Image (cartoon, rainbow, N blue to C red):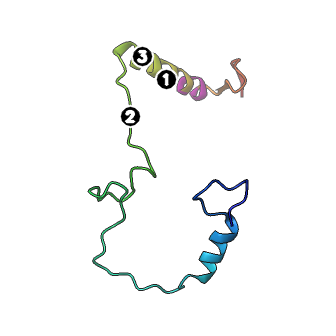
Amino acid sequence: MNDETTPRGWIDDDELAAMALGADPNPVIDPDQPPWSAVGHDVALLPGWYMAPLSGTRRGTAAKVTIGVIIASFVVINALGLCVTYGWVTVA
């Protein structure tokens, strides 16, 4: 079943549904079978294509201080019983 909307080599929804309904509901899985990996040598709990590795950047001291001051100001404003929900400091 390959029509104009399904790229060549892909399985369309009808074929996938037929395969799912025809599959064994209680397959026997070898307990010694290693997890599937697209690379073959990676034995992580989640494969790399499912969740990309973390990629962070280091922040300088000025950025850390600025973030700290902003967070501390929100904490102080809320501790004083004020509200900054809409950008202006008002009595809560």
Residue 70: image location, x then y, percent: 51, 20
- In the rendered structure, which segment of residues is drawn in magenta? 75-79
Find out whether residue 47 is within the magenta segment. Answer: no
Image disc number at residue 39: none
Asked whether 80 or 7 is in front, the reply is 7
Q: Nearer the viewer, mark 3 or mark 1?
A: 3
How busy is the neighbourhood of tag 2: few (under 14 within 10 Å), some, or many (20 plus)? few
User: Of residues 62 and 82, which is closer to you in this image?
Assistant: 62
Mark 1 element type: helix
Measure how far apart labels 3 and 1 are at the Cα level: 14 Å
State whether residue 2 is above or below residue 57: below
Q: How far apart are marks 2 and 3 (CA)?
A: 18 Å
Task: Indicate which label's residue lies in the foreground, 1 or 2.
Answer: 2
- Residue 5 placement, left or right of 27: right
Q: Which amino acid does label 2 sit on?
A: Ser
| Residue 64: x %, y % from top left | 40, 20
Secondary structure mostly seen in the magenta stretch: helix
Q: Name the residue under label 3.
A: 63
Q: Which residue in the structure is indicated by mark 2? A: 55
Q: Residue at x 66, y 73 (%)?
A: 17
